[in-house]
Image (cartoon, rainbow, N blue to C red):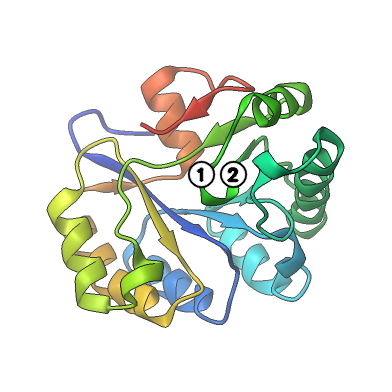
């Protein structure tokens, strides 16, 4: 249950899982909070134990397409396969069906939106982007998020980078100490909007 008197944030991690995902889960297990992982379908089988651990901890495992293409360049049939195959892999690993996805690069168009609506999926982007893929600098990632983050934000990160995992080892305990609630994307969106609508893009 989200406390309306305390700030709430959704930390999200794209492109994994990876060897660095466990470090993020370790710090969450130690300090509390939940996050959302937008996973690539072609990485699910290899990292199934990490995905199951995250799911059992209350974190959310969400589709990020099978192998990270720009969905706007694909046919409707190919878009559907990218999403459906990833959702099926997540369901096989966790027993839970993802009803959202994050389009790779954040790119959507009318075609992608129509496929999302047909599949009953909401689309989720972000409101804070520290560009951790660009700097690969722990201090830069940490300081950017601390400077920009506010109540109700969705933060974009990537759990494929060691520098990002190290930044989370500082950031997560700091946010918890400041009484910030770290919740999943679904929890945040339902808190803000009441329901999550298929075919709608959420960026907070």
Horizontal arrangement in the rendering, residue 172 relative to residue 61 (left or right):
left
Which residue occupies the foreground of this view, 31 or 188?
188
- What residue sits 51% from the left and 37% below the top? 124
Does any portion of residue 12 appear in the rendered image?
yes
Query: Relative to residue 75, is residue 169 drawn left or right?
Result: left
Residue position marked by numbered label 1 in the rendering: 106
**Mark 1, secondary structure of its residue:** helix
When asked about the image quadrant of residue 6, the answer is top left
What's the distance in space between the residues labelled 2 and 1, CA to CA?
5 Å
- Relative to 5, say whether 31 is above or below: below
- Return the x and y of residue 160 as percentages of the image width and height: 51, 74
Which of the pair 164/75 is nearer the observer? 75
The residue that label 2 is drawn on is 103
The quarter of the picture where the N terminus appears is top left
Q: Residue at x 68, y 31 (%)?
A: 112
Confirm or deny contact between disc 2 and disc 1 (CB under 8 A): yes
Q: Is 140 placed above or below 14 here?
A: below
Q: Position of residue 180 (x, y in %)?
A: 22, 48
């Amino acid at each position: 249950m989200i406390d309306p008197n305390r700030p709430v944030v959704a930390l999200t991690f794209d492109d994994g899982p990876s060897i660095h995902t466990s470090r993020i889960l370790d710090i969450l297990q130690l300090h509390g909070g939940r996050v959302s992982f937008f996973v690539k379908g072609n990485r699910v089988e290899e990292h199934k134990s990490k995905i199951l651990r995250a799911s059992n901890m209350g974190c959310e495992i969400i589709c990020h397409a099978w192998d990270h293409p720009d969905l706007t360049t694909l046919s409707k049939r190919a878009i559907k396969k990218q999403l459906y195959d990833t959702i099926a892999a997540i369901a096989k690993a966790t027993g839970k069906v993802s009803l959202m996805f994050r389009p790779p690069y954040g790119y959507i168009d009318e075609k992608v939106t129509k496929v999302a609506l047909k599949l009953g999926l909401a689309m989720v982007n972000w409101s804070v982007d520290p560009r951790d893929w660009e700097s690969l600098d722990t201090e830069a990632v940490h300081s950017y998020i601390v400077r920009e983050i506010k109540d109700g934000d969705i933060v974009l990160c990537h759990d494929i980078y060691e520098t990002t995992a190290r930044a989370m080892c500082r950031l997560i305990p700091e946010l918890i100490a400041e009484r910030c609630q770290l919740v999943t994307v679904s929890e945040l969106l339902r808190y803000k909007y009441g329901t999550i609508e298929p075919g709608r893009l959420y960026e907070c």
